[in-house]
Every structure is written in C-alpha cells, then in structure tokens.
Amino acid sequence: MREGFVIRVLRAGSAVPAGVGFVVGERHVLTCAHVVNTALGRAQRDQEAPGADVRVQVDFSLLGDPEGAPLRSCRVAMWVPPPVLGVSGGDVAGLVLVGEGLPAGAGPARLAEVMDVRGAEVDLFGYPGEPPRRDGAWARCQLGGVVSGGMIQLDADSEAAFRAQPGYSGAPAVVADGVGDAVVGMLAVASRDEDVRDAYAISVARLVDAWPEVLESVPACPYRGLLSFRAEDAEAGLFVGREEEARRLRRMVDERALVVVVGPSGVGKSSLVNAGLLPALRGTGEWAAATFRPGETPFFALARALYDLEGPDHGLSTEVVDRRAEQVRGEGLAGLAGKLSVLIGRRILLHADQFEEMLTICPAGERAEFLDRVLPAANVDDVPYRLVCTLRADFLRPLLEHADVGGRLQDRLLPLSPMGVATLERAVSEPAWVRGVRYDDGLARQIAIDAAGGGGGLPLMEFALTELWARQRQRRLTFADYHSLGGVAGALDRYAEGIFAELAERGLEDQVRRVMLALVRSREGAAQATRRIVGQDRLARDWPVVEELARRRLLMIDD
Ligand SMILES: Nc1ncnc2c1ncn2[C@@H]1O[C@H](COP(=O)(O)OP(=O)(O)O)[C@@H](O)[C@H]1O
Ligand SMILES: [Mg+2]
C-alpha cells in the first residue's frame, strides 16, 4: 500500500529531504523536476535536464525497516522542467533506479484518473519545515476539481500542514477507495507565497503525457470476454454483482447435499460457483473442492475430480481413474465421498459444471445410471459431501423426465436470472476502478443499459468491455471508442465479421462454413440452435481453420 510506494528524495551528501516522490514501475520513480534541482544543489527553476551520469539518492523511509530506510541511487530518465515563472506547468522528473532494484515491501502505486468527487479526501506525505524535518507526516486535504492545464486543485484547511512546505513537493496525492490506495496526482507546488492559499497536483493524465513509455502501458484487462470468472478473479476484486446470490448459494451448500444452479445460457452460472462460492469455501480451510464436466463419460470425469480433491494432478493413469469410476458406479458417490472426506480430513464439494452435458452428449444408459448413483437421495442432506451442479434452464425439463429426479431436486434449486441495470453498472465500472482506469461520465451506465436491454446479456457485454479496454488512452474509456466498436450488441458481430472477411480473402470461406455448421445442432427448430461439442476427428480436414478461430477466441478447443 502507500508505505510501499512513497519515497524520499535526499539532498546530495546529506540525509535532509529535498522532497517526495513515488514508485510507478519496477524501477521507476516520479517526482518534481524542482525537487531534483534542490536535491542536486541547483537553482530550483534550473531548466536543464541533469546528465546521464548524475545520480539522485532516494530512500524508502516508510517501509519501517529496522536496519534503516533502504537507500537507492537513480538517474534522471525523463525531464519536464519547472515553470520559469509562476506556480504551474511542467515540473515532472522520471527517475530510474541504478543498480539495486526496489527493496522488499516496495512496489508501484496504482494510478487512477481523478474521479469527479469533489470533496474526496486526499492524503499527502511530506517533510514539514524549512529546512524540512527528517521525520515526515501525513497531511489531509480535499479534492477540489480539475482546473486548467490538467492541474487538480487541492483544498486545504487554512491550517493545513503541508502548505508553504517545500518538503511536500512531489508527494503522491493518495485516495483510499474500495480497493485500496490509488494515486490521483502529484503535488507540484506547495506555494511559499502567503497569498496563494491552495495547492495543486499534476493530474495522472499529465503525468502519463510526460512519461508515456512507462505510464501509458494498458493495465491487465479485468474483464473475461466470453470466459467465465475464476476464483482468482474474485480474489482480485474483479467479480462484481453476484454478492447476494453468492451468499444464498453459500447458505444452501451448508444445508443441502445437492444444489443445482439453474438459469439461461450465459447468465453467469459457472462464474457464480467458481468465483462466488469456491474462494469463500477455500478460505475456511474446511473444504476440499474440485470441478468436473460430465461429458460423454461422466463416471470417469467424476472419478478424476475425486482424485483432484486429494491434491494437484499427479499424472494419474487412465486405468487408475477407471478403477475409481467403477467404484462410484458400484457403491455410489455417497459411500465413496464419505471415506474420502475422512481420509483428507475435510468436507468435500464437487462442482459438476455444464450438467446439461448429461442430457446432450452422455449416452442414455450411462445417464440413468449416473443420475441414480451420484445425485444425492431425496431428503438426505446429512452427508459429508456436497454436489453443486450448474444447469441450463432449458434442460431442466428433460432432466425431470428421469425417474426420481424431481424428489432429489426438491428445495435444492437455485434459480439465477440476469442482473439488473444498477448491478450491471457496478459490474462494468468496479473492475476498471480496480485497475485505475475510468469511464467517461455516464458510459458505464449506458453500457449497463445496453447489456440489459439488447439480449445476449453478459457474454456480449464482457466481450465489448474487453475490446473497449484495449482502446483506452490515458487510462480512460470513452464513448467515442464504445460507439466505434459497435456497442454491446455489435462488438462481437463486428469482430467475427472482420475475421470471417479476412479468412474469406485467404480463400478459406468453405472451410469456415463447414466448421461452423458442424458446431451447431438445432433442437426443436432452428431458433433453438445450441452450442455443440464436436470431436477433433470430425473436423480433421479443416483443423487449421479451427485453430485459427480458437486463437481469435471464436471457438474453444478442449483437451
Ligand atoms: N458477475 C459478472 N459480471 C460480469 N460478467 C459476468 C459475470 N458473471 C458472468 N459474467 C460473464 O458472462 C458470461 C457467461 O458467464 P458464465 O459464468 O460462463 O455463464 P453460464 O455458466 O451461465 O453460461 C461470461 O462472458 C462471463 O465473463
Ligand atoms: Mg457455464
């Protein structure tokens, strides 16, 4: 957090601070140009960039290292001179560590475009006094809004400690948001002029302009495109909007041996279990969990998941897994899971994802037997394992056609519907904020409205967001870019059309057509066309096209 990115710039040959700075990359530090001038004993407004052989000393005084603050030597890699006159303009220096890298506990700050939150509290660390004292202090002020030239006004109480204090120059303006500390600017001048009551920070956009090679890199995309969310996404604060459903699921898992999450295709069933449930269970230390997809051989898939419970894959042979599959077939899941639970000393959760495969690709005989041996018996919830299935709602009816299934599903269904606009808006904006990126005012809401209204829902929304992410500039996502990629409804269309046109130009049109037709099966008329899983052998002659489509994320290849 903040202690890890605030640094102190030292005056040459002494331990007296010249100002402050902050870490922005693996070896990169930002401060004010006039702070560097002070550190080097030059005139404050010296315009000339220091030479490549000049060294500036910085230390990490907030790391609380008992050995003393770790000291590092830097060269000046970027220079925007201080204003010749007046208080604002320029005044940015980029330092690069020479020799040793960042000390333990230090790391780059998360930069965030300032949100329009007038009055939000901003913290600044600096060294009060003139000459500055060695022990610093945090000072608090309020965000006053952006004024001309990309400067952010900071409103301070008249008593504010940092005003008129050169030892605060270069300080990161730190806001604490829901995710942690973010830097919204760099304090440029704490004016010594008694009449200038306010302090100004240089905005992130200006800092990025000054050092684009280092600061403009697009942060890792927080959206998942067409893929479902995983436990690690939830742990990074990127899985947003299903808090209530996750709580409900958690409660049901406590009480029921079986929970079937039912909902339309793409509503977020798999994500809810993987990102909304599994991390919470793992956190308790009481549970072992594994996921499987039934596929054509559900007993085999389940048997492998049972081995996964015991630890990471240890290269099991097919024979070993087969033997366990036969055990499940023989004695049922309940008995086996009970023994396993005792063996590993934890409760067991098995997640059968895409349970509809039981009704599509699993042969009928196998299906009846699996449902009988594996679905927990009606009204028996006092067992040491849990089975959580995700099931497309349109397959609930065919599932109910099997003897006894209705009783076993009694009180064990968790129906899942799409999120409403307000929740979708959070699912759009919060992951970006985690990465320090902001939307044009009103854009997150517009995207939520488009996703809620247009059909296609979450997958198309996540796809559009992923495309939009790549187009950001200066950590900002704009209406112009959103419209140019065709909005939620158009983004995937345009993307797919573009790839099709390109493949057609290369003379591959017929191959693409064959692959696509092989992947669609229509049930109950064309309107009910469903995704389909097809073996590699059926597509063999078109395989290069399959691989190309998979590389461009339009198909998935599973091993
Ligand atoms: N909470 C969420 N916020 C934003 N996007 C989500 C959320 N949950 C799921 N998605 C997205 O929706 C799509 C479908 O998710 P998935 O979990 O695979 O749904 P299902 O299993 O119901 O088909 C994916 O693109 C995924 O990234
Ligand atoms: Mg799914």
Image (spheres, rainbow, N blue to C red):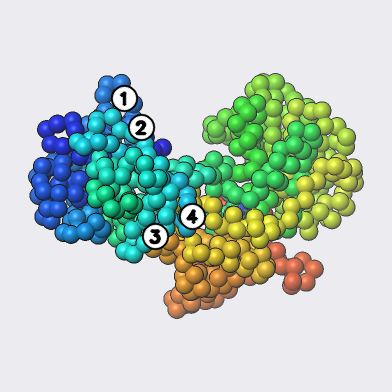
Label 1 to label 4, Cα distance in Å? Answer: 35 Å
Label 4 to label 2, Cα distance in Å? Answer: 30 Å
The residue beneath circle 3 is 146
Callout 3: helix, strand or loop?
strand
The residue beneath circle 1 is 65
Label 4 to label 3, Cα distance in Å? Answer: 10 Å
Label 3 to label 2, Cα distance in Å? Answer: 32 Å
Disc 1 and disc 4 in contact, CB within 8 angstroms? no
The residue beneath circle 4 is 117
Horizontal side of 384 relative to 346 (left or right) equals right
The percent coordinates of residue 132 (x first, y second) are 23, 35
For marks 3 and 2, the one nearer the N-term is 2
The percent coordinates of residue 441 (x first, y second) are 51, 64
Disc 4 and disc 2 in contact, CB within 8 angstroms? no
For marks 1 and 2, the one nearer the N-term is 1
The residue beneath circle 2 is 105
Mark 3 vs mark 2: give the one in front: 3
Dot 1 amino acid type: Asp
